Image (tube, rainbow, N blue to C red):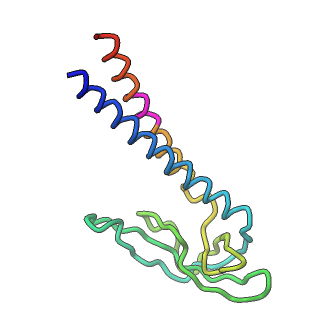
Amino acid sequence: MLTTVLIVALVFVAFGTLFAAIGVGMRRGQNRFKAHAAAARGTVTDLRARSAGESSSGVIWVPVVKFTTADGRTVEAETSAGTNVKRHKPGQPIEVLYDPRQPADVRVPDWGSGLIHGIFVAMGGAFVLTGLAILAIAVAVT
């Protein structure tokens, strides 16, 4: 019985650690991008529907933007993320961040990604705490 409880506790801790690490890694990647990104004012030229997952019937709307880089190049590219609602319309002005070395790597600044990172870290923390609580209760009972 105690062995099963220990395994369950360790599984909770392992999954929690994994979730938290994913959230922290996503945040660090975003911060690295922002550190070298350039800003531009562009225009939404299109909205493209993307599947939210292989088994999902949900749709994510990804804006396509056109902007001019600091060195004068005109770029039209799909942003790296979208939403499940149509937040933008073709012709609408939009602020973007782009990688000057690869201008097609374009993102909409602060577009809810901080929330996603936080959710991963919070879920990870909850799993870790649950695993530790299970472990503490099992040790106290024996």
Relative to 17, 105 lies left or right: right
Q: Position of residue 121 (x, y in %)?
A: 50, 42
Q: Is residue 30 magenta?
A: no
Relative to 2, 38 lies left or right: right
Residue shown at the point (50%, 81%) measured from the top left: 46
Relative to 114, 16 lies left or right: left
Question: Which quadrant of the rendered structure holds the N terminus?
Answer: top left
Q: Position of residue 23 (x, y in %)?
A: 51, 49
Give residue 99's quadrant in the image.
Answer: bottom right
Instruction: Please tell me which residue lies in front, 29 or 108.
Output: 29
Q: Residue furthest left?
A: 1
Q: Residue furthest right?
A: 71
How many badges with numbers are in the image?
Answer: 0
Residue shown at the point (43%, 28%) measured from the top left: 129
Image position of 33 with respect to 139: above or below: below
State whether the magenta stretch is mostly helix, strand or loop.
helix
Q: Position of residue 117 (x, y in %)?
A: 53, 49
Image position of 25 with respect to 17: above or below: below
Q: Residue furthest top?
A: 141
Q: Residue furthest bottom?
A: 73
Residue shown at the point (66%, 80%) measured from the top left: 103
Q: Is residue 127 magenta?
A: yes
Q: Position of residue 95 (x, y in %)?
A: 67, 69
Give residue 127's quadrant in the image.
Answer: top left
Q: Which residues are magenta?
A: 125-130
Question: Which quadrant of the rendered structure holds the C terminus?
Answer: top left
Image position of 29 with respect to 89: above or below: above
